[in-house]
Amino acid sequence: MIPKIQSPMAHRLKELDFLSEEAIPKQVEKKSRLFSKGEVKVFKGKHIEKFSTLKLKGLNIYGYEYGICYPRNRCYPIFIYQCIYVPKRAVVTVNYAYHDLEGTGNIPGIEELLALDEKLAEERLYKIVKPQHFLVDELIENTYNGMVNTEYVEAGFEDIIVLFKQWYQGLMKNYNCLPEESEEFCLWKSHFKDKFYTKDYGYVVTKRYLGKNWTDKVFKEYLR
């Protein structure tokens, strides 16, 4: 049996005063199929295009939480988290996707974010795992990608919130994109969205548990 999650990621995000939840259709927000359940939430905030989350429970043996936050009018990394938990182990990952990996040193607040990322990883993770192979060339190298004991899943959730707050501080320090930078970033972001939703582990597993129709709608219109 997987642990009962007392405070899912969406509940924790609701508590942040710089985010507000967006209303979405009820038939999209929640989905049940046999013994599986899915739930989608969308949040917005200053300089945030949207922060979309997905929670999935398959029977009583599998849990999955995912979130992706897109910056608005800022050439700034996309924030992504994923949590996979089964009865005896869990994987918690945080990633920062960016269009110009050679220029990451110029991103305001990135050094502080990566230092905190490394510190929390050392405290929480007992084994490091590699990011999904198709993402490697578009991710800023970081440390918080690994395994935790299942009883510490919610501690991992709290680490994600801490990292997201730090990410947001950097976002608020960032400057508006120059026209040419904005065009390059927007083109990359659109390409990244298309590639991510079709190849990502979360898309594949959600389709397996909750069916292709709901999964396609959620990923194309709300998580993308």
Image: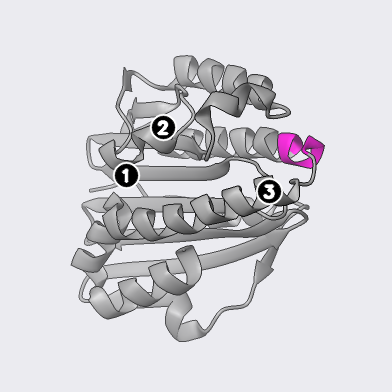
Give the number of the mark in front: 3 or 1: 3
**Residue 32 tag number:** none
Circle nearer the N terminus (1, 2): 1
Q: Position of residue 108 (x, y in %)?
A: 73, 29
**Residue 180 tag number:** 3
Q: Residue at x 58, y 49 (%)?
A: 184
Q: Which amino acid lies under the numbered mark 3 shown in the image of this protein?
A: Glu
**Viewer-closest of 120 and 94:** 94
Direction from residue 7 to residue 37 in the image, left or right: left
Q: Position of residue 120 (x, y in %)?
A: 53, 21
**Residue 152 tag number:** 2
Q: CA distance from mark 3 to mark 1?
A: 38 Å
Circle 2 residues within 10 Å: few <14, some 14–19, many ≥20: some
Q: Which amino acid lies under the numbered mark 2 shown in the image of this protein?
A: Tyr
Q: Residue at x 55, y 43 (%)?
A: 79
Residue wearing tag 1 = 84
Circle 3 residues within 10 Å: few <14, some 14–19, many ≥20: few
Circle 1 residues within 10 Å: few <14, some 14–19, many ≥20: some
